[in-house]
Image: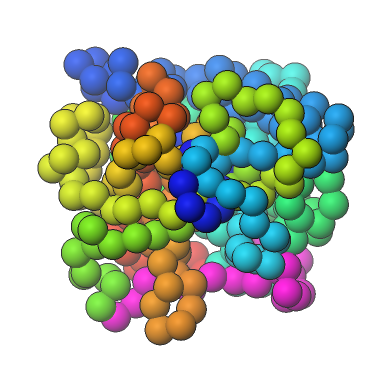
Amino acid sequence: MRLFVLFFFFVFASITAGNADQTSEGFIGWHQNVGTKNAQEIRKTEEYFYFLNRIVGGTIAPVSAHPYLVGLLIDVNGLQNPSACGGSLLSATRVLTAAHCWYDGRFQARMMTVVLGSAFLFHGGLRTPISAIAVHPLYDSRTFANDIAVLYLPISVSFTHAIRPIALPSGHLLQMELSGYWARAAGYGRYSDVTTPTTNTVARNVILQIMDLKTCRRTYGNAVLDSNICTNGYGGVGICQGDSGGPLTVISGGKDVVIGVSSFVARAGCTLGHPSVFARVSSFVDWIHHHM
């Protein structure tokens, strides 16, 4: 992710031919071309320093700063190495993530391991395989429309200072025009277009300003739907490879609320000022509640 003032995980989209050059991974086969490569980089960096930096433009945060943040290690059919994504803990048994983390249009995941309460994707924390997944029925792997999924856990997770669920939008947040508001993204992903190992911890956050969809479509065209949220990339901030599925959050009523799921950024690079695009959780909240 590319962060700015605060703290940090994954990205991709298969956009229309006219805008394909603007997408982060504008082609089918995200796991092979992005996910597995990013996971290998994360593993190498963790094993070398046992620390890791990602999200671009942001700063390091302790696990307790985003106890709802989930890491996902993904075993993919046809690929030798694991892929990686992020997610949000919704309850003791449910995790919210991006649908393309399960199926990217070419490669199908066969298993996901959920990582909770750890600043590291490959080390520490509570780890458990999922027992089932619900992918939105209108998810389109070619365009990443409706890029949202709910994971089922086989155990009931005990909550701690480092493991705690996040609230879904309700009340005024369901219909609220968010343009101009500030939100926070978190993840385990790349923190610049050219990542070098550091001794900083992996989990990061970044503060991003939500932008109007009309302006966002100047970059991505019709790939941006009314069911998306875009954030301004001015100053080289946003999400990056490794942040897919991770949360975009705001504070409402004194508590963190997840309003977006990291979906895609520009193919040209994460730090070049292009918008970041998220699935808008309020557009899918009824479907999510059905799977809670």
Q: How is the image coloured?
A: rainbow
At a point 38% along the width and 27% down the height, the residue shown is 272
Dominant secondary structure, magenta: loop
At a point 48% along the width and 52% down the height, the residue shown is 5
Give the x, y percent position of residue 114.
Answer: 70, 51
At a point 21% along the width and 69% down the height, the residue shown is 176
In magenta, the rendered stretch is 149-171
Of 258 and 138, which appears nearest the observer? 258
Residue 103 in view? no
Of 114 and 45, which appears nearest the observer? 45
For residue 83: magenta? no
At a point 13% along the width and 42% down the height, the residue shown is 214
For residue 162: magenta? yes
The picture quadrant where one finds residue 91 is bottom right
Of 175 and 256, which appears nearest the observer? 256
Of 52 and 39, which appears nearest the observer? 52
User: Viewed as shown, does residue 56 lie left or right of 289?
Assistant: right
Residue 5 in view? yes
Does 51 sit above or below residue 76?
below
Give the x, y percent position of residue 54.
Answer: 61, 38
The picture quadrant where one finds residue 199 is top right
User: Viewed as shown, does residue 262 lie left or right of 172?
Assistant: right
Give the x, y percent position of residue 163.
Answer: 70, 68
Give the x, y percent position of residue 117.
Answer: 74, 61
User: Viewed as shown, does residue 82 lie left or right of 210?
Assistant: right
